[in-house]
Image: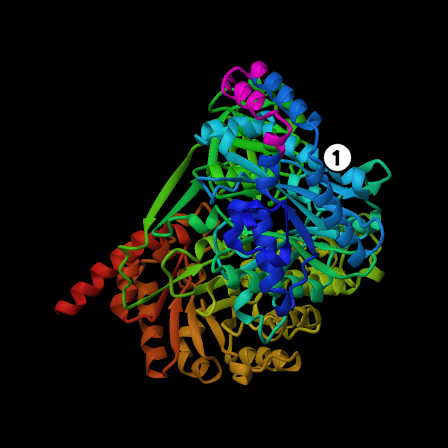
């Protein structure tokens, strides 16, 4: 009978065997049987069953002693809990292993050695289960032992695993969740080690861990054994792959190099962390083909289980092969109620104490409590902000009562990040200096509501929460699009009811993620300022060339937005920096003229065909080609800003064609901004060379009224609702319709003034692009206007 066996091999197990071998082993068996034939590589191994644990307790005569001690533990008394947990582990570890159990384990190990070689190294992992609660996972409660060789080491590791059922945190967990200690058992997985100490390892999620966006695979990667990534001891590489175009394209839509300061390797006595080399820290861990292979495997696993998955992978440094070593259901984002969208927004900023990576999109506040050792967690009080170097399961009792968490180390899949998501509290990880910059006892605000970067502000800084009920949201006839500048928030914004993106500005991506003037990258070898060269070297490591850095980073930013809203249209506007703004980029001062009024100077279309900038514009074209042709995001439409004349439009289209972007080819649409009176007056002519218009009400207002809105002397006159501006807008909408050209608006006015949005609906505009935070209120105003027009 299977339920009376000590050993079950992976090829004998399925997911239905959780009560016998726990979740980890049952999942490995399921994948080993079902997915190897689909190309997913899983190292072989066997499970020491929960029955073996029960047999040990009974046969060795310690069951009564264990029962007596656990029934008397007061988990609220930390000292008593710690002492009795230690006593229980000692009893189990010192118990005499039944000869028949030892023999069964040794025979199974011997069989594994025949397949993989003498003294095969194995990973020995605990996998707890419960007789009456087969779905309980007990994640993170027990121990794992790596690089175990030979029979004596294996039996010793098994004893430690069995004993680990009674760590203080495991006992506390069971009491909190009302599990009977004597009905929770422990199975052990013994699996051939993958020599990732000589290569790399990490974690894969088949869902975005921050937003719950389901169309991407998210991979973390670091050098050495995988424990550092899981525990948050390193800031790993991060890769995003878009699922929906994987069958025909190579959509690695974002890559970020992590710091990866340390890596865990084998030693004769176990494992230890050593410093990664400079080259390792500054290189991507995985090649694109490896990233895509892991993503494909992850999708096969997800499809098999019919749910988002949390997967561990490893690369063998000897064979250079990739393997999947664990998989479990993702339990945070996949369980979210998607009927409501909750949007946190900082009302104002404060003094920044430190910056890291944001986990979640919320804001938390309270008194800081800087704790560097787990031994001091008793000093933590409910509602405080936990500030520490990193966390592990021992910290969980206080993490549950924290208003926010700040760590110095770790990436977005480290322990602190995973637990904070489960708890629904904001967490900023990888600050590097949090415990020194933040003092215990001061009030702080932890903001994860501002994109990828998380900010820790001094004091209680005001914020607000906007709640959106998607289920009850009726869509108007007029298309409601969004202005999305920040690629890091695109997945999150995609849940807001929308018809796509009406404006994605390249300037934000260039400013925030590239930071360097394109000409400084094109002419890097000729740069004379060593300080500028050093800054560029610091930002561009990991890329083959400086130009490759610019093209890839720009493509990644555009692709994140394009993927978030796929297959809806995403209108990407080519760069529209003014000369003074371009000059502020690293290395920019050498390539930009000084203009008296940059607002109406050398910007937009006039740059793209200029001999002084056309090579830089070519990089933007390459980035768009990468997004559309390599990633398969054909929903991306491009838009030309500040195009003064029809002739200019033709010259830009010709320049695009030279760089492989031809209007109409492969479905490419090209729009033009309508932000200059000439665009309205010559709308019929512009319609002949462009597929659509997007009204930029900000610049159109300035140029119609002849004022500089940044000038305090005349700013009181600035008003998009001025009748002259409205007449021009009404006229261009009419002309676009007559010429069968699409027309929308991406300016600020409809976001700020619902009555202006109603005016646009009355004019018959096709789409209105709004800032995400104004979608709800403006949509309601549009619905009211549409109902009134229907009654006429």
> Residue 475: where, in percent of width, then height?
29, 63
Residue 616 is left or right of residue 647, and the answer is right
Q: How many marks?
A: 1
Front residue (pair 780, 737): 780
Residue at the image position 84 percent from the left and 61 percent from the top = 526
Q: Where does label 1 land, which residue?
A: 156
Front residue (pair 4, 285): 4
Neighbourhood count class around disc 1 (C-alpha, 10 Å): few under 14, some 14–19, many 20 upward: few
The region drawn magenta spans: 56-80
> Residue 682: where, in percent of width, then height?
42, 79
Q: Assess whether residue 61 is covered by the magenta stretch.
A: yes
Q: Is residue 178 at all visible to an observer of this figure?
A: yes
> Residue 4: where, in percent of width, then height?
57, 45
What secondary structure characterizes most of the magenta part?
helix
Q: Assess whether residue 564 is covered by the magenta stretch.
A: no
Q: Residue furthest left?
A: 791
Q: Residue furthest right?
A: 268
Q: Is residue 232 above or below residue 369?
A: below
Residue at the image position 85 percent from the left and 52 percent from the top = 118
Residue 477, quarter of the rendered image: bottom left
Residue 173 is left or right of residue 347, and the answer is right
């Amino acid at each position: 009978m299977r339920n009376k066996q000590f050993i079950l091999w992976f090829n004998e197990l399925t997911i239905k065997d959780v009560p016998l071998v726990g979740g980890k082993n049952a999942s490995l068996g399921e994948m080993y049987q079902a997915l190897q034939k689909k190309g997913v590589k899983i190292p072989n191994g066997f499970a020491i069953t929960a029955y073996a644990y029960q047999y040990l307790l009974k046969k060795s005569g310690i069951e009564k002693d264990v029962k007596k001690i656990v029934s008397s533990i007061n988990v609220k008394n930390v000292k008593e809990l710690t002492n009795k947990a230690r006593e229980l582990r000692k009893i189990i570890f010192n118990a005499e292993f039944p000869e028949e159990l030892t023999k069964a384990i040794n025979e199974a190990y011997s069989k594994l050695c025949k397949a993989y070689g003498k003294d095969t190294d194995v990973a020995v992992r605990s996998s707890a289960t419960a007789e009456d609660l087969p779905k309980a996972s007990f994640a993170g409660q027990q121990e794992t032992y790596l690089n175990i060789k030979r029979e004596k080491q294996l039996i010793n590791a098994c004893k430690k695993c069995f004993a680990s059922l009674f760590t203080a945190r495991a006992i506390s967990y069971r009491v909190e969740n009302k599990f009977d200690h004597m009905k929770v058992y422990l199975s052990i997985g013994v699996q051939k080690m993958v020599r990732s100490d000589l290569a790399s390892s990490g974690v894969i999620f088949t869902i975005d861990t921050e937003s719950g966006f389901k169309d991407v695979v998210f991979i973390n990667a670091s050098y050495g054994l995988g424990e550092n990534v899981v525990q948050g001891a390193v800031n790993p590489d991060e890769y995003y792959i878009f699922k929906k175009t994987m069958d025909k394209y190579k959509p690695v839509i974002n890559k970020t190099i992590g710091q990866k300061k340390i890596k865990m390797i084998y030693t004769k006595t176990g494992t230890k962390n050593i410093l990664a080399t400079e080259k390792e820290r500054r290189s991507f861990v995985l090649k694109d083909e490896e990233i895509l292979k892991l993503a494909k495997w992850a999708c096969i696993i997800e499809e098999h289980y019919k749910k988002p998955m949390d997967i561990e992978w490893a690369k063998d440094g000897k064979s250079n092969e990739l393997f999947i070593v664990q998989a479990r259901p993702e339990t945070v984002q996949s369980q979210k109620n998607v009927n409501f969208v909750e949007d946190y927004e900082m009302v104002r900023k404060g003094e920044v104490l430190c910056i890291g990576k944001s986990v979640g999109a919320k804001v938390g506040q309270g008194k800081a409590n800087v704790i560097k050792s787990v031994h001091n967690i008793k000093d933590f009080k409910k509602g405080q902000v936990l500030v520490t170097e990193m966390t592990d399961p021992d910290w969980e009792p206080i993490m549950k009562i924290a208003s926010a968490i700040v760590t110095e180390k770790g990436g977005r899949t480290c322990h602190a990040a995973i637990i904070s998501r489960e708890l629904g509290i904001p967490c900023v990880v990888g600050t590097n200096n949090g415990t020194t910059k933040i003092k215990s006892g001061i009030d702080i605000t932890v903001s994860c509501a501002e994109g990828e970067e998380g900010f820790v502000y001094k004091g209680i800084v005001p914020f607000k929460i906007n709640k959106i009920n998607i289920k009850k949201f009726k869509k108007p006839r007029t298309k409601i699009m969004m202005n999305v500048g920040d690629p890091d928030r695109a997945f999150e914004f995609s849940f807001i009811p929308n018809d796509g993106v009406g404006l994605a500005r390249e300037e934000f991506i260039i400013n925030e993620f590239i930071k360097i003037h394109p000409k400084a990258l094109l002419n890097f070898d000729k740069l004379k300022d060593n300080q500028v060269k050093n800054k560029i070297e610091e930002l561009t490591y990991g890329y083959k060339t400086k130009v490759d850095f610019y093209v890839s980073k720009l493509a990644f930013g555009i692709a994140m937005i394009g993927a978030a809203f796929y297959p809806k249209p995403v209108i990407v506007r080519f760069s529209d920096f003014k000369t003074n703004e371009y000059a502020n980029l690293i290395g920019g001062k050498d390539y930009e003229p000084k203009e008296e009024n940059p607002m109406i100077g050398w910007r937009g279309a006039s740059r793209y065909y200029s001999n002084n900038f056309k090579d830089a514009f070519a990089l933007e074209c390459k980035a768009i080609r990468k997004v559309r042709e390599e990633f398969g995001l054909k929903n991306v439409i491009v838009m030309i800003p500040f195009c003064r004349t029809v002739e200019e439009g033709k010259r830009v289209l010709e320049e695009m064609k030279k760089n492989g972007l031809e209007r109409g080819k492969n479905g490419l649409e090209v729009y033009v901004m309508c932000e200059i009176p000439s665009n309205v007056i010559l709308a019929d002519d512009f319609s002949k060379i462009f597929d659509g218009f997007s009204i930029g009400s900000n610049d159109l207002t300035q140029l119609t009224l002849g004022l500089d809105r940044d000038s305090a002397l005349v700013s009181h006159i600035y008003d998009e609702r001025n009748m002259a501006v409205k007449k021009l807008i009404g006229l261009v909408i009419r002309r676009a319709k007559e010429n069968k050209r699409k027309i929308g608006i991406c300016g600020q006015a409809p976001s700020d003034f619902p009555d202006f949005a109603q005016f646009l609906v009355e004019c018959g505009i096709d789409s209105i692009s709004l800032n995400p935070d104004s979608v709800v209120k403006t949509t309601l105003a549009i619905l009211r206007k549409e109902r009134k027009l229907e009654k006429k």
